[in-house]
Amino acid sequence: MHAQARGLGRTILVAARTMALFTIALGIGYTLVITGVGQLALPAQANGSMLTGPGGDPVGSALIGQSFVDADGAPLLEYFQSRPSAAGDGYDADASSGSNLGPEHDDLIRAIGERKTQVAAFNGVAEEEVPVDAVTASSSGLDPHISPAYAAIQIDRVARARGIPAEQIRSLVAAHTRAPDAGYLGESRVNVLELNISLDELEG
């Protein structure tokens, strides 16, 4: 009986030591090593791909979209607007999600029609010119990009609001347009936050 008890105690002690060893090695050591490698090799990505405004203060992440609205939730004329978001109240990183409505759902069809009318009126274009990403949310609700087509219909409105020649704004959009990854993966895209930061920097 005493031998069995000693054997059980030894087994528990070995198990406890092994658990402590692997907790330190994998739970702490591995985490510190990977964090250090990330900070050295990819510091921007490791810290959330944060972007700073003209004043040097952080204004958001290049990976997470945001809305450009006033205190009442109305879109600001002087900024390029992001696509709709179904994440919480809009671009809520704690509530990432799409609408989960099918393409033939009455609520989605109605929302798309209303958004198309609003986007066309806000930008002074015909409804036929409004691209699909201007009226539909991404599956995550956090997409920071819009299509070049959506950026294009906003150029004149932003130019008027800022008193900047449209051609200058168009060149800025072109500079911020990214081609598909590896030349064929995905679509061409424009990061809205990066573009709006450049607009503010353009005006000093």
Image: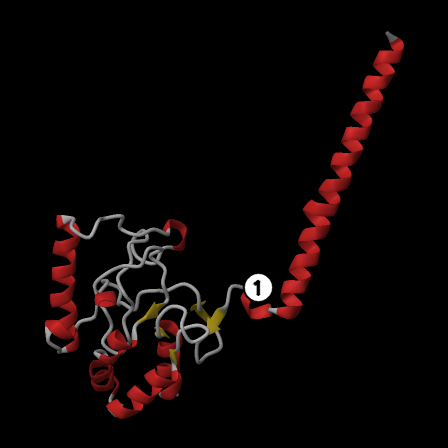
Q: Is residue 203 left or right of residue 111?
A: right
Quarter of the image for the C terminus: give it: bottom left
Quarter of the image for the N terminus: give it: top right
Q: Residue at x 55, y 70 (%)?
A: 44
Q: Residue at x 36, y 63 (%)?
A: 143
Identify residue type, mark 1. Ala
Q: Residue at x 66, y 69 (%)?
A: 40
- Tell me the residue that label 1 is attached to: 46
Residue 97 position, x and y percent, is 34, 51
Instruction: Say which quarter of the image contains residue 79.
Output: bottom left
Q: By what rule are the colours in the image chosen?
A: secondary structure
Residue pushed farthest right? 3
Q: Nearer the viewer, residue 23 or 181?
A: 181
Residue 190 position, x and y percent, is 35, 75
Residue 33 visible at all? yes
Q: Nearer the viewer, residue 176 or 65?
A: 176
Q: Is residue 190 left or right of residue 12?
A: left
Instruction: Say which quarter of the image contains residue 77.
Output: bottom left
How many marks are shown on the rendered structure? 1
- 10, above or below 82, in the image: above
Q: Is residue 148 left or right of residue 59?
A: left
Residue 166 position, x and y percent, is 24, 89
Residue pushed farthest front? 184
Residue pushed farthest top? 1
- 27, above or below 145, in the image: above
Residue 141 position, x and y percent, is 33, 57
Element type at mark 1: helix
Residue 121 visible at all? no
Q: Is residue 67 left or right of residue 12?
A: left
- 179, above or below 2, in the image: below
